[in-house]
Image (spheres, helix red, strand yellow):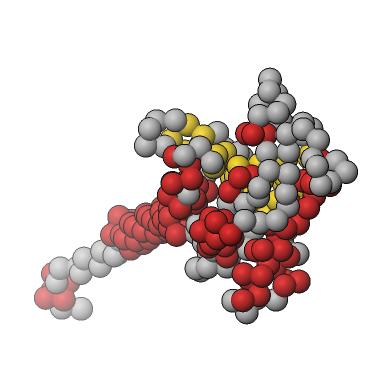
Amino acid sequence: MSEAAEEAPEKEPKEEKKCESAGGLRWLITYADMITLLLGVFIILVGSSSVESQKFKEMSSAFSRVFSVFKGGGGEKLETRAKKEPVVEKSGYRIPGVTVPEQRFIEQIEKGFKEEKTSGRVVIMPTEEAIRVSFQDRLFFKKGSDDIVLGSEKTLSKIESLLFSTNNNIIIEAHTDASQPEKFRSNWELSARRATALLSALTKKAVAKGIDSLEFEKRFEVVTFADTELAVPSDPLSYKNNRVDIVIKYE
């Protein structure tokens, strides 16, 4: 073996490539960031959708309160909400249990019968279940009679417009004073005749407008009280005890 070969330097062993742990797992950091961002976006989307849903419900409720006095126009039921919310009138007087649509309906009635209300011949009494419009009997009848007077046409037309604007159920209540009627056996008979006479007059107006009489009358109840529920208990003979009440139920 030659000396040159013996003197040749030995080759250094190749260094083994080492796997850097930080560099090798760098993709995992990016993946975790992406998952975190996606989770954040998902939470934002869910939160936004629930807020919009709530806003939509509030908006729907607001629109229904404003526009559902007569659902879809004339001849529809007056809508109410399951939970009654009190309404404050312009005067500041609170009517317990009366909702916004009902309050607007009451205002329409008061406006329609403003003349009769001012003269004391009509009293409007809203409750939680219905609107009671009390008419003095002299608007429709002469003392002790069940014949509707000719001068009642104007008031009957107002009642007609009121009842035809909604298909809610209606009660006609007739009351008398404690005096003994001349033409009838009792005040029970007189009040019954007056209630049915008023219903008959309203039915004729409905038929004239092409409404079936049976379909119209099935919304009504006729109730007679004679002199058992006096408006002025301290004066059983007061003319104010003679009245016909039209009760419009909210539902």
Could you say which quadrant of the image residue 27 lies in? bottom left
At 43% from the left edge and 55% from the top edge, which residue is drawn? 66
Of 114 and 185, which appears nearest the observer? 185
Residue 54, percent across and down?
45, 52
Res. 232 image quadrant = top right
View extreme (front): residue:
182
Q: Is residue 15 above or below residue 178?
A: below
In which quarter of the view is residue 98 placed? top right
Task: Return the residue nearer the eye: 246 or 86.
Answer: 246
Question: How many discs appear?
Answer: 0
| Residue 73: x %, y % from top left | 50, 68
**Seen in the image, is 170 located left or right of residue 85?**
right
In the rendered image, residue 61, in percent from the top left (x then y), is placed at: 47, 54
| Residue at 68% in and 20% down | 234
The relative height of residue 185 versus residue 24 in the rendered view (above or below) is: above
Q: Nearer the viewer, residue 26 or 137?
A: 137
**Does any portion of residue 202 appear in the rendered image?**
yes
Image location of residue 45, percent across then percent down: 39, 59
- Determine whether 224 is above or below 96 in the image: below
Q: Is residue 126 left or right of residue 39?
A: right
